[in-house]
Image: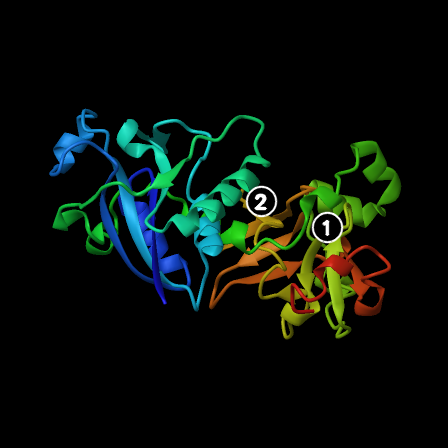
Amino acid sequence: MKREIYLAGGCFWGLQKYMDSEVNGVISTECGYANGRGEKVTYEEVCSQTTGFCETVKVVYDDNKTSLDDILREYFYTIDPTSVNRQGADIGEQYRTGIYYSDANDAPIVRMALSDLQKGYRVRIAVEEGPIEKFIPAEEYHQKYLDKNPGGYCHINFEKIRKLKAAVVDAARYERPSGKELRERLAPVQYDVTQLYMDEKAENDIYAHCSERGLYVDIATGEPLFSSADKLEGFGRTAFRKPVDPNVIMETGGLDGVGDDESAAVSRVGRSYIGRIRRDAGEKYLANSSALRFVPYDELEKQGYGYLIGKIEI
């Protein structure tokens, strides 16, 4: 069954593109101006901040494939809910945030979603909610603007949102030890690799030919980094096609000997040097075994990694 919701979230170009390309179950979208004064309005008049209209995207979705809760969860990824009359670099009442419904039965769902969202913020969120009183479709050149102009302005960071949505590792479970603790706990080669960014010799790689099922975690913090399901063979050292969560590995430069198609891989919590990310013929992670600790599958629950079972392939 087709249902609709109206979402205001700053410049409607980016929000429309996000709903079209990133959200399952969306049937169609339309840019327009919502809940202002007057029966007709132009973009220029809206930008004059004299009409009370806000840039809004009408989202039509299939409730057999998604739900209003899911649509709102996706919408929340795209906004700063505490910002008043501003999103990204855009300032003015036409850029306020709001959720407007045409079906009164959606009201409690919207209010509950906003109540749950508020729990994550100390300051009061500024997202309006209420019925859609007026919606005027925007000019044709605004519709699917970023499809027509791929390099056009967009305040939404799509890549950052994709990483957030793919998050499965709970960073709060792990903590970086002090420098003194690291020196005492780590073997000399482990310290040199993780803290001094020194690559170990390939012949010393103890996990290069390990075929056991399990997780490879940061030797310094225990944060999960790689899964045995993503292990690559034929590189002469421990290699993976991707991390278990795109947020657990950061990229950095400034490493001696790193080529144009390489960057350094650093763990999120521990800031440990793990190895190199290579992009010749596809992305791959070449890790130093001294930066990792292997946790066998049968030990995951016992060692505190049970929360990942079923969430990632191991």
Q: Position of residue 298 (x, y in %)?
A: 84, 69
* Amino acid beneath label 2: Leu
Which residue sits at x=22%, y=54%? 144
Q: Is residue 53 visible?
A: yes
Between residue 94 and residue 22, name the one nearer to us: 94
Between the C-alphas of marks 2 and 1, the distance is: 23 Å
Q: Earlier in the sequence, mark 2 or mark 1?
A: 1
Q: Is residue 258 visible?
A: no
Q: Position of residue 233 (x, y in %)?
A: 65, 74
249 w.r.t. 97: above or below:
below
45 w.r.t. 257: above or below:
above
174 w.r.t. 213: above or below:
above
* In this picture, residue 98 sits left or right of residue 178: left
Q: Position of residue 138 (x, y in %)?
A: 17, 45
Q: Secondary structure at mark 2?
A: loop
The residue identified by callout 1 is 223
Q: Residues within 10 Å of mark 1 (few under 14, many from 20)?
A: many
Query: Which mark, by number, is residue 49?
Result: none
Between residue 106 and residue 87, name the one nearer to us: 106
* Amino acid beneath label 1: Glu
Q: Is there a contact, CB below 8 Å, between mark 2 and mark 1?
A: no
Between residue 202 and residue 195, name the one nearer to us: 195
Q: Where the N terminus falls, by quadrant? A: bottom left
Which residue sits at x=37%, y=36%? 97
Q: Position of residue 216 (x, y in %)?
A: 73, 60
217 w.r.t. 191: above or below:
below
Q: Where the C terminus falls, by quadrant? A: bottom right
Which corner quadrant of the image does residue 90 belong to? top left
Task: Look at the image and name its color scheme.
Answer: rainbow
Most extreme residue toward the front, as rendered?
Answer: 104
The residue identified by callout 2 is 255
